[in-house]
Image (cartoon, rainbow, N blue to C red):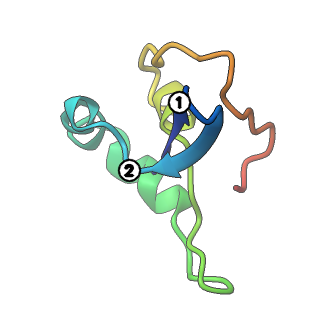
Amino acid sequence: MIQQRFDEETKSTWWSEVDPWITDALYLHPNFREYFDARSGTCTNGLYPTVTVRQIMWALKMKPIKRERWETVFDRREI
């Protein structure tokens, strides 16, 4: 799971770990393990299957965090 960040000074974005305030709600969700097992996979070219924090929140039927104007949008299942 990844979350996009934004630097207002340089107007650049990057991906990093999910905010600590939301991890318990995600990881302790009753359907998290099922979702994780369905989406997990083997490493390909040094990369593991990845989902954004908003994608997993939608999948778990949680109210997603607010989408920021600068965020990258993925319309495919695989990132």
Q: Position of residue 33 (x, y in %)?
A: 34, 52
Q: Position of residue 61 (x, y in %)?
A: 47, 21
* Dot 2 alpha-carbon crowd within 10 angstroms: few under 14, some 14 to 19, many 20 or more: few
**SS type, badge 1:** helix
Location of residue 21 with respect to 44 vertically, above or below: above
Disc number at residue 17? 2
Location of residue 70 with respect to 20 vertically, above or below: above
Disc number at residue 54? 1
Q: Position of residue 48 (x, y in %)?
A: 56, 72
Q: How many marks?
A: 2
Along the horizontal axis of the image, is 42 left or right of 37?
Answer: right
Q: Residue furthest front?
A: 9
Q: Nearer the viewer, residue 34 or 55?
A: 55
Q: Residue at x 53, y 33 (%)?
A: 7
Q: Nearer the viewer, residue 21 or 8?
A: 8
Amino acid at circle 2: Glu
Q: Position of residue 65 (x, y in %)?
A: 45, 18
